[in-house]
Image (spheres, helix red, strand yellow):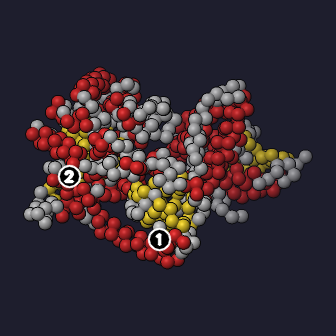
Amino acid sequence: MNKHQASVLMRHEVGLHARPSVKLTKLAKAFESRIDLGLSPDGPWIDAKSIVKVMATRAPKDSTIYFRAEGSDAQAALEALVTLVDGDFQDGR
Amino acid sequence: MDDRAQRAAHRVEGRPAAPGIALGPLVRLAAVRHDARQHRPPEEERQALADALAASQEALGLLARGAGDADAEAILSFQVAMLEDDNLAAPAFALIGGGEVAHRAWRAAIDPEIASYDEASDPYFRARASDLRDLRDRVLRHLAGEAEQIVPSGVIVAADDMPPSMFLATDWRGGGLVLRRGSPSSHVAILARSRGVPMVVGVDVDLLRDGADAVLDGDAGLLIVEPDSDIRATYGRRRAEQSELRRTAAAFTGPARTASGESVRVMINVTGLAELGDIDPAEVDGIGLMRTEFLFQGREKLPTEEEQYQIYRRMVEWAAGRPVTIRTLDAGGDKPIAGLTQPGDINPFLGVRGVRLSLRHLEVFRAQLRALARAAVAGNLKVMIPMVTVPDELERCRALLEEVLEELRREGQPAQMPSLGMMVEVPAAALTIEDFKADFFSIGSNDLIQYVAAASRDEPQLADLARPSRAVFGLIRHVVDHAERVGRETSLCGDLAGDPAQVAALLDQGLRCFSVAPGALGPVRAAIARYGSASA
């Protein structure tokens, strides 16, 4: 089984609100793996592909976002998500 | 028909409803389905919700792609993303499984989400509550069968009929409207004229091909499908000339005076705050008619007192001391409101409408009167009662207004008694105007004309009868004369006031206050300025 974890500090000025959440969930959905998101290293975990749940975390600026992924492309998924958050949700790769 | 009919271009004759010219592709709107609210088996409710979600998603996707600016696109793509997430509707589907109907299940699922955003401490998250409300209402509209089609701008829309709420939600820049039903005096036509949207009615829209190139001539009441390049060029030139003319007329601002120097007040008719954005209050003498029924239409619930108060107050603030005449709910007739007006009224124009309806739905009426009395504190607000036939109706309204004022005073809410006037649109009221203790009068010429002539404004064959006649002008003079004797003001807020060709006849009757669609301000002022120049 292919399980991975990663964390990244979010510096986006308004936190994980609408636009960042749209981008994050869209990206997560591009991967087959099951991907969870949490605001602490031991959860609670929510589905990173669900914008309803991601928005519900109300993660403010300077939160550390934790990801865990399980599946064939788990490693690639985490790298992409961390890059997105670290790059302040800018477009492009 | 002349030889042009033999060419490839296909001419379809209708009736002109709003002037102007539009060139663009035809977009056929599907007919509106009605009332999906009977009880159905869970499987059908489930399907109804699934369909409404899919349709909303599609509509939002189209909107997002055509948004054109990054902010609008971001907001819309958030809504799309929320809809795409099964987690949003999952509780609704569970409730449907338990026997709930789709629209209530959807509300039960999304309302707690909205509430949780409303309660967020972060203003960015709080602001998303309005996006979710928007989303909720869009899906509800689909569930209610108000199939909503997103109309891109710059097209000629062809449909059976169109509710005013949909008209107001459409971007009409460069576009036009063709309807099978409706008439030049229907509400959509009034809106079309006030917004400068060319419109033709009485066209068999079934014969029109979706996507066909067309020219709409709102002056002649003509639609030309697949015009050749000559026709296109001619109409392109005419359109350019007209917009130039409109600019000149619009430039005719400032206080209106007749050629002999007599000043005439020109106010505007509006349906909501949105229209006021483009108008400088200093350029008008106030709002002569605010039609509140548009606040009530096309929605799941009637507007609350608070919601109404906010809108009325902002209008009064916009006017900065100028009068704002707000007409109480004028539903019924051609303006049905779900849950309030009686469907299948045998003869709606002679039925329970206007004040007759309000006095039978006191809880709705009181909420409106309370909102009006509260907003009156903010400036010069006037309350106008529609469809008054006998003095007792007006007196009952005054008593109710006094009652809610007392109620608000006890609650410690700031409120004020606004002046209370009446629409004069029923011949019985016009004939016995001396009996009415109104603070002001406003002649509603559209209804007055059809009631005087006993000819429906929606009956194309009777268009010649449903016109201003000597009988109508006689009644107008009677009202104006009486008002002058008792020191009251009379204005006229029907279409008659906005028709530059009728301005002289109205001034002849002694009328010195007009209330017109914003688009008619310039032309009416210009016509007033010409008055008396030849005869003086």
Give the position of the C terminus of chain B as an image quadrant: bottom left
Please give left or right for residue B466 compared with residue B432 in the image: right
| Number of other residues with Cα within 10 Å of mark 1, as a class: few under 14, some 14 to 19, many 20 or more | few
Q: Residues within 10 Å of mark 2 (few under 14, many from 20)?
A: some
Q: Amino acid at mark 1?
A: Asp
Residue B245, x across and y down, in percent = 33, 69
Comparing labels 2 and 1, the label whose residue is closer to the camera? 1
Chain letter belonging to callout 2: B
Residue at figure coordinates x 27%, y 25% from the top left: B396
Expressed as whole percent of the image width and height from the top left, the position of residue B141 reads 56, 41
Q: Secondary structure at mark 2?
A: helix
From where the camera sits, is residue B409 visible? Answer: no
Image side of residue B442 versus residue B235, left or right: left
Query: In the structure shown, which secondary structural element does the residue marked by tag 1 occupy?
Result: loop
**What chain is tagged by disc 1?**
B
Residue on which disc 2 sits: B506
**On the image, which quarter does residue A30 sit in?**
bottom right
Q: Earlier in the sequence, mark 2 or mark 1?
A: 1
Q: Which mark is residue B340?
A: none
